Amino acid sequence: MPTELEELVEFLHHGNTQIRQIAVTVTAHPLIGVSPTAAENLVSYSKTQPTIFKTGQLTPVKDLKLLVKDYPPIANNALIILINIATDPEILKSLAEDDVFLETILGRVTVRYLTDLHAGKASITNPNLPRT
């Protein structure tokens, strides 16, 4: 029988955006019957138990890679989880060899930088410092 945490990871694959958001936004929700402890710790469990994301030929990892394109609250937590579980060699290989995923990540970083540059929040000479 799967644990609550394993069941929560399975919701990353759900077709409903609201259910996926519940799974990655680390808040408990009575609809899915997950205790607050399990839900609140999904991101922290990604640090301590990355193997829960390796089930079904890395299906949760594939789902997380797709969720990086989702709404910002979902995308942010999905990316945090991916960063945490990338210490596993099999997961890292899956991330590093996925050109579409890498293009998505680089595209988001570039768009964010260009947006900040246009808004005066970054500088061409030093992207870490505000423009004067």
Image: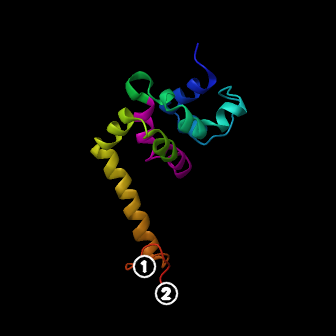
Residue that numbered label 1 is attached to: 123
* Corner quadrant of residue 60: top left
The residue depicted at 34 percent of the width and 45 percent of the height is: 101
- Magenta segment boundaries in residue numbering: 60-78
Q: Residues within 10 Å of mark 2 (few under 14, many from 20)?
A: few
Q: Residues within 10 Å of mark 1 (few under 14, many from 20)?
A: some
Q: Nearer the viewer, residue 72 or 39?
A: 39
Q: How many marks?
A: 2
Residues at badges 2 and 1 in contact (C-beta under 8 Å)?
Answer: yes
Kind of element beneath mark 2: loop
Q: Amino acid at mark 2?
A: Thr
Residue 27 image point, x, y percent: 67, 39
Side of 94 relative to 67 (left or right): left
Residue 81 image point, x, y percent: 51, 42
Q: Where residue 15 is drawn, which disc sits there?
A: none
The residue depicted at 38 percent of the width and 80 percent of the height is: 125
Q: Is residue 12 magenta?
A: no
Q: Main secondary structure of the magenta part?
A: helix
Can see residue 78? yes
Q: Where residue 132 is drawn, which disc sits there?
A: 2
- Most extreme residue toward the bottom is 132
